[in-house]
Image: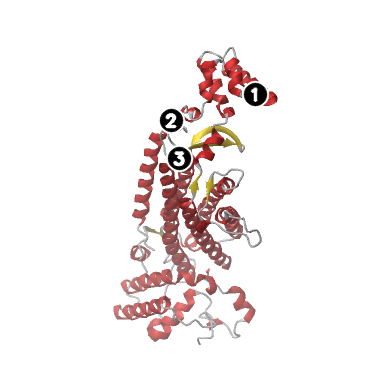
């Protein structure tokens, strides 16, 4: 009996070896064991509440489920060859422990609603953890922002567009830009969790049951905020997995962009930051090398996170209602994305928390006179010149400065329209303070932004805590 699948009744021959190997999911869905047991306990309570089994029977099955939980957590659970997935393995063992009573566990339930239930429980907890790790990285970045200073004496660096030096910006403003992006990721994850907080238990294989089970009761038992409305949808819906994979893929894209910057910053050409030895790697051949492998892998793994999303969408695309075995393909990408993004978030947090910022290198790159060109144009605008004319006027000076290798400040001093008064705009540290508009990169709006950032981080922390999905 134990070497036959649970569904053997209708079959005369045993399953082929190749079928078992191809269709098993135990090797990766083992990690759903907690959620399967929690789901099963709720289901058993539901069976007792509907008087389909007696209270004594329910207690006996729950005891067996708890024994299985102990065996699982201590690593003593023994799997057998016919265990297709974690769900059948647990049911088999419960029946072994609790005999005929255990054999009542699956009454009114299908693996289709069982799997969907376990996976939603898993997502509620694990996505909350990803949100927490994302916020931890936000905290590291906002701490580094505060350290580098939001005020007039803050560290500044060139801001880039098209990877060309554009205007000086506070380093705090630069760090914070990443934090705002990642707070949207956290927000998105919490919304995904709220949307997936629906119990599919009671949908059965696809149509519900003839037994008087109460889907609201089990939804409450499991801490879901509501139950499914349509049994066909309940067992076929994997939107929540696709959403989770999108949320994570976008985190991956954000980490990749952040990683790319750190790869550049730590080059000798930039020299903007030095990684701590504990967060950098060496070369097997080149003794002088110190590499930013964490940053590179953050960039590299984003490809895989995007692949996990597109892979699942392709799997779902042409699937008719309701459950089809294709849906088993939801788990590996999900588990992989959650695992990889969690590793990336923690490694990047450590790398950025411990890195040394080379403030003089950043400042001297940003103090290049050419980065003040816009200030010169705006100075002319403030004196009545139309912007397009001012732009052309300064552009011609820049061109002459480059062509004749003359300092821009010399040309400005000699210029009739600009003159000596405008030269101070090109002095070190002047430009960064001149961006005064709300949300801009200078110290005046920076002080306001720093308060906005702290407030937003606190709100996010509270929202994650309110999810109350302990790991
Ligand atoms: N391991 C399967 C999955 O993850 C379980 C569901 C199998 N259901 C079925 N009716 N064959 O989707």
Whether label 3 lies within 8 Å of ligand 1 gets the answer no
Q: Position of residue 78 (x, y in %)?
A: 47, 82
Report the residue that reaches farthest toward the front: 287
Q: Residues within 10 Å of mark 3 (few under 14, many from 20)?
A: many
Residue at 65% over, 20% down: 396
Total labels drawn:
3
Look at mark 3 in the image and give the residue it sits on: 172
Which callout, 3 or 2, points to the residue nearer the camera? 3
Q: Nearer the viewer, residue 133 or 154?
A: 154
Any mark on residue 19, and which?
Answer: none
Cα separation between marks 2 and 1: 36 Å
Q: Identify the residue position indicated by label 2 in the image.
A: 438
Q: Which type of secondary structure does the marked residue at label 1 adopt?
A: loop
Q: Which mark is residue 406?
A: 1
Label 3's element?
Answer: helix
Viewer-proximal residue, 68 or 45?
A: 68
Q: Earlier in the sequence, mark 3 or mark 1?
A: 3
Tell me if 259 is positioned left or right of 446 in this view.
right
Q: Secondary structure at mark 2?
A: loop
């Amino acid at each position: 009996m134990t070497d036959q699948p649970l569904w053997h009744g209708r079959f005369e021959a045993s399953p082929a070896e190749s079928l078992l190997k191809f269709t098993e999911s135990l090797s990766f869905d083992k990690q759903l064991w907690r959620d399967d047991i929690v789901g099963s306990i709720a289901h058993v309570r539901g069976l007792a509440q509907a008087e389909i089994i007696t209270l004594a029977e329910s207690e006996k099955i729950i005891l067996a489920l708890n024994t299985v939980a102990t065996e699982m957590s201590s690593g003593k659970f023994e799997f057998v060859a016919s265990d297709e997935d974690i769900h059948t393995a647990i049911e088999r063992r419960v029946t072994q422990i609790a005999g005929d009573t255990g054999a009542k566990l699956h009454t009114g339930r299908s693996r289709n609603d069982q799997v969907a239930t376990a996976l939603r429980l898993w997502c509620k907890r694990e996505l909350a953890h990803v949100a927490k790790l994302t916020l931890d990285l936000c905290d590291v970045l906002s701490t580094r922002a505060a350290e580098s200073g939001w005020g007039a004496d803050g560290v500044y660096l060139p801001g880039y567009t098209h990877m060309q030096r554009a205007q000086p910006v506070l380093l705090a403003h630069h760090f914070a830009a990443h934090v705002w992006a990642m707070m949207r990721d956290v927000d998105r994850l919490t919304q995904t969790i709220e949307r997936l907080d629906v119990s599919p238990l009671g949908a059965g294989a696809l149509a519900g049951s003839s037994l008087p089970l109460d889907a609201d009761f089990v939804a409450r038992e499991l801490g879901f905020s509501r139950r499914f409305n349509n049994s066909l949808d309940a067992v076929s819906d994997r939107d929540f997995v696709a959403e989770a994979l999108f949320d994570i893929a976008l985190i991956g894209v954000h980490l990749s962009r952040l990683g790319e910057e750190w790869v550049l910053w730590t080059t000798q050409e930039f020299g903007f930051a030095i990684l701590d030895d504990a967060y950098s790697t060496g070369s097997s051949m080149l003794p002088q090398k110190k590499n930013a492998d964490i940053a590179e892998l953050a960039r590299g793994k984003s490809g895989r996170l995007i692949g996990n999303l597109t892979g699942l969408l392709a799997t779902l695309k042409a699937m008719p209602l309701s459950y089809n075995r294709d849906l088993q393909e939801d788990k590996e990408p999900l588990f992989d994305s959650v695992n990889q993004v969690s590793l990336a978030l923690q490694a990047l947090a450590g790398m950025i928390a411990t890195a040394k910022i080379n403030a003089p290198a950043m400042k001297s790159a940003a103090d290049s006179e050419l980065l003040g060109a816009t200030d010169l144009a705006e100075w002319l605008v403030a004196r009545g010149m139309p912007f397009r004319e001012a732009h052309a006027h300064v552009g011609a000076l820049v061109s002459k400065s480059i062509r004749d290798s003359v300092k821009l400040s010399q040309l400005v001093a000699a210029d009739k329209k600009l003159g000596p008064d405008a030269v101070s705009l090109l002095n070190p540290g002047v430009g960064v303070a001149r961006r005064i508009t709300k949300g801009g990169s200078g110290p005046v709006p920076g002080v306001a932004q720093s308060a906005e950032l702290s407030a937003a981080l606190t709100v996010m922390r509270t929202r994650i805590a309110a999810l109350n999905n302990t790991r």
